[in-house]
Image (spheres, rainbow, N blue to C red):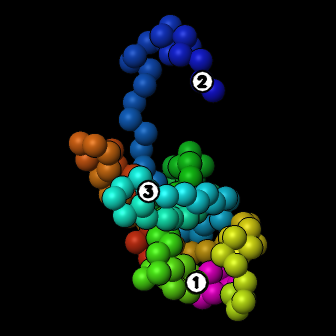
Amino acid sequence: MTDVSNFMDASASDFDAPQPLPKGRYSLTVRNYESGVIPNEKATPYVKVLFAVSALIDGEATKDEISSAGDVENMFWMTDKSAYRTKEWLRDIVGLDVEDRPFRELFEEAIGATVIAEIDHELRGKNKDFLVPVVTEFLAA
């Protein structure tokens, strides 16, 4: 956990908004995943996949921008009407045999896999004032 006293003694001018990963096509490595339920009236289950940026394939990013990018996230909604998309991603993009296998096992096996993705930006946050990189499309390698 971060110690708040470190921030209390730091100069506010030392902190700038993080710059999002520039738009482009990237090679991403599945780093981890987490599952949960969105606390809304529908209680929507999800799996959030965290990707490390491996390399720029097409775009304008510098090596420094790539190395300081942090994780890229993608949400997969796990409802009766949308879980087929997750199955297709695991099969067609990650390249796993999905027949008769539970999602938990498939996501565990996906860790370390490399995928190709188009990255764009989206404003998020309560006031839509936080620019984050988002996956707009996964491409078969």
Which dot, 3 or 1, sits closer to the camera?
3
How far, Cα to Cα, is label 1 from label 2? 37 Å
Q: Is residue 118 in view?
A: no
Contact flag, marks 3 and 2 (Cβ < 8 Å): no
SS at circle 3: loop
Q: Quadrant of residue 42?
A: bottom left
In the image, residue 4 lies at what x, y percent?
53, 16
Instruction: Evaluate whether residue 38 shows in this view.
Output: yes
* Crowd tier of the residue under label 1, counting other residues whose Cα lies within 10 Å: few below 14, some 14–19, many 20 or above: many
Residue 7 is covered by the magenta coloring = no
On residue 2, the disc is 2
Front one among 15 and 41 = 41
Question: Where 58 sits versus 60, above or below?
Answer: below
The mark found on residue 38 in the picture is 3
Relative side of 71 to 110, left or right: left
Quadrant where the image shows the C terminus: bottom right
| C-alpha gap between disc 3 and disc 2 | 26 Å
User: Residue 87: x percent and y percent?
Assistant: 58, 84
Q: What amino acid is at disc 3?
A: Ile
Viewer-side label of 1, 2: 1
Q: Earlier in the sequence, mark 3 or mark 1?
A: 3
**How crowded is the residue under tag 2: few (<14 C-alpha within 10 Å), some, or many (20+)?**
few
Q: Residues within 10 Å of mark 3 (few under 14, many from 20)?
A: few
> Mark 1 sits on what residue?
87
